């Protein structure tokens, strides 16, 4: 309601379901890995298979309403991601259990941060204040948890930012 008017409130569930489905996009890295080792034919077959699954799920869910239709994209994305990861794991020699070990900490941190931010959203306060508090607490919780779990990505970001600022202070041009 802060950025969009009340007439757009009905679209929020669609955006939420779409955002959940998009969470699986980073797993496309496995298709890139398959391409990188020269097995583009397998990557093409996996993509075609994913599209067939998507179309079949959409054709079935079309008759049950728009919420089920949008939710079905999450289901089909999950199915095709699991299959892609399983196939790619065998081809590139990356065990599926190792994939879980890599992904699970990030998923847990994201879910905890999302839960905290959602909880703050339930508190009574003005929209602007709520947005600012959710944003700052979300960033803080995520950074604290990634620091606590010693995520490599956080160190990368910190060193990258330090490098940018130190170069800028030394040579402003």
Image: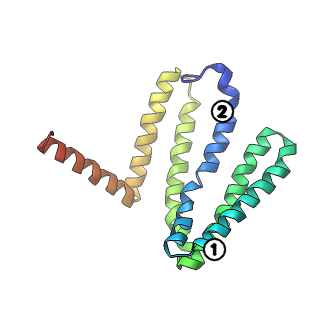
Who is closer to the viewer here, 82 or 155? 82
Q: What SS does tag 1 mark?
A: helix
Q: From the viewer's perspective, is residue 80 above or below residue 93?
A: above
In the rendered image, residue 83, in percent from the top left (x then y), is placed at 67, 68
Quadrant assignment, res 91 = bottom right
Assess disc 1: are there few (<14), some (14-19) or many (≥20) residues with their C-alpha within 10 Å of its C-alpha. many
Who is closer to the viewer here, 133 or 29? 29
In the rendered image, residue 100, in percent from the top left (x then y), is placed at 56, 67
Q: What SS does tag 2 mark?
A: helix
Question: Can you identify the residue that label 1 sits on?
Answer: 87
Q: From the viewer's perspective, is residue 22 above or below residue 16?
A: below
In the rendered image, residue 129, in percent from the top left (x then y), is placed at 47, 24
Find residue 75 and name its label.
Answer: none
Viewer can see residue 150: no
Q: From the viewer's perspective, is residue 92 above or below residue 28?
A: below
For residue 149, side relative to residue 43 (left or right): left
In percent of the image, x 56 and y 66: which residue is there?
A: 31
- Precedes in sequence: disc 2 or disc 1: 2
Who is closer to the viewer here, 125 or 100? 100
Asked whether the beta carbons under mark 2 and mark 1 sit within 8 Å of each other, the answer is no
Question: Can you identify the residue that label 2 sits on?
Answer: 12
């Amino acid at each position: 309601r802060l950025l969009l008017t009340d007439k757009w409130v009905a679209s929020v569930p669609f955006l939420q379901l779409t955002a959940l489905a998009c969470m699986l996009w980073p797993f496309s890295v496995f298709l890139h890995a398959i391409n990188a080792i020269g097995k583009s034919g397998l990557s093409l077959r996996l993509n075609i298979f994913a599209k067939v699954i998507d179309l079949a799920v959409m054709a079935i869910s079309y008759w049950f309403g728009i919420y089920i239709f949008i939710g079905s994209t999450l289901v089909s994305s999950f199915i095709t991601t699991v299959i892609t990861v399983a196939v790619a794991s065998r081809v590139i020699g990356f065990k599926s259990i190792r994939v879980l070990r890599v992904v699970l900490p990030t998923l847990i941190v994201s879910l905890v941060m999302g839960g905290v931010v959602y909880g703050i959203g339930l508190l009574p306060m003005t929209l602007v204040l709520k947005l600012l508090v959710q944003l700052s607490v979300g960033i803080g919780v995520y950074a604290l948890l990634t620091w606590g779990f010693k995520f490599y990505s956080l160190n990368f970001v910190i060193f990258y930012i330090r490098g940018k600022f130190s170069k800028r202070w030394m040579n402003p041009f």
